[in-house]
Amino acid sequence: MGSIVVKGKKKEIFRKIKLDQIDRPVDIARMEVDQDKVQELANSIRERGLLQPIEVTPRGDRFLIVFGDRRYLAHELLELKEIMCRVEDIDDNQVIIDRAMENVQRVDLTAFEEGHIYAGLVEKAGLSLEDISQRVGKSPGVVQRRISILRMPESFQKALHAGLVSMSVAEELWSCPDQAKREYFMDLAVEHGITMRVARGWVDDFKKEVRSREAGGEGGGGGLTPYEDTPIYRACDICSGPVQYKDLKELRVCGSCHDGILEVLKKGS
């Protein structure tokens, strides 16, 4: 197969390579590959061709993808046999760094995926939080917060990855000392949608109740069961402040009137 050599600061070889000679990254940073986006990309490639080659690096008689995994998957979907590649000889450590820098710039990257990328740079590439911070343009604190997601329960990671809760809400609920109650609160957060203030209110009320019962010395060692009643809040539609469910007021109106009332009240406030 012919190749094109481009001379510049470093040697780059462009050539078509058979798909069955190419290996995908072993450690995919994304929780799952969005098949709809792969299909969209395949449709684009079918109509317009591949606009940007993927990047691979030689590994023995095979090649490892550095950039362009979804373009590779789109070619598989189209049942194409070859794909145009930019071939560069890169060591394993640099592959990790290059791939991470490309992935972290994705506009659709979730907080979970971002944390996975940063953790890989620490564990596999030996970078410090400061090193990562300088490379991605974010503070070491933000980098650490993203990495901390990997220590959260799987249900929290999935909710963050799906965009069902915000990072701040997940962090507040994670501070709950009771595992069962954490999961209960997360289920409520996903179902109803809450703000950070509401999440903090739930956890603070639970902690206060635990302290109150412990201070009361209710003998027998019964303790607090994780599903005993505690105040449950949701965000007010008008001011976004926390309000207990028992204090919510109901107004039966159609959707159009509901939206109009909210708009008037918000303007008035």
Image (cartoon, helix red, strand yellow):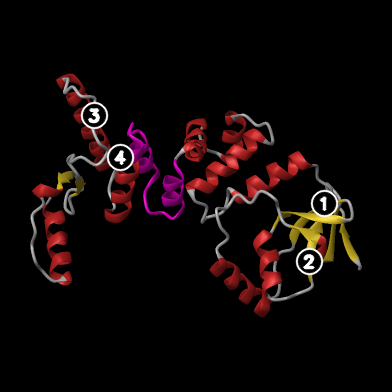
Residue at x 43% of width, y 49% of height? 160
The residue singled out by tag 2 in the image is 19
Give how far apart the Cα atoms at labels 3 and 4 are.
14 Å
Judged by depth in the image, the label closer to the viewer, 3 or 4, is 3
Residue type (three-letter) at the residue carrying disc 1: Glu
Residue type (three-letter) at the residue carrying disc 2: Leu
Give how far apart the Cα atoms at labels 2 and 3 are.
61 Å
- Mark 1 lies on a secondary structure that is loop
Q: Is residue 168 magenta?
A: yes
Comparing 51 with 221, the one in front is 221
The residue singled out by tag 4 in the image is 181
Q: Return the x and y of residue 192 as percentages of the image width and height.
A: 26, 54
The residue singled out by tag 1 in the image is 88
Residue 125 sits above or below residue 264 on the image: above
Judged by depth in the image, the label closer to the viewer, 2 or 1, is 2
Q: Which mark is first along the chain, 1 or 2?
A: 2
Q: Which mark is first along the chain, 4 or 3?
A: 4
Q: Which residues are magenta?
A: 153-180
The residue singled out by tag 3 in the image is 223
> If the image is split into quadrants, where does the N terminus sit?
bottom right
Left or right, residue 250 beside residue 12: left
Left or right, residue 112 beside residue 8: left
Q: Is residue 258 magenta?
A: no
Give how far apart the Cα atoms at labels 4 and 2 are.
49 Å
Q: Is the Cβ of the residue at disc 2 closer than 8 Å to that at disc 3?
A: no
Residue 250 sits above or below residue 174 on the image: below
Give how far apart the Cα atoms at labels 1 and 4 are.
51 Å
Mark identifier at residue 121: none
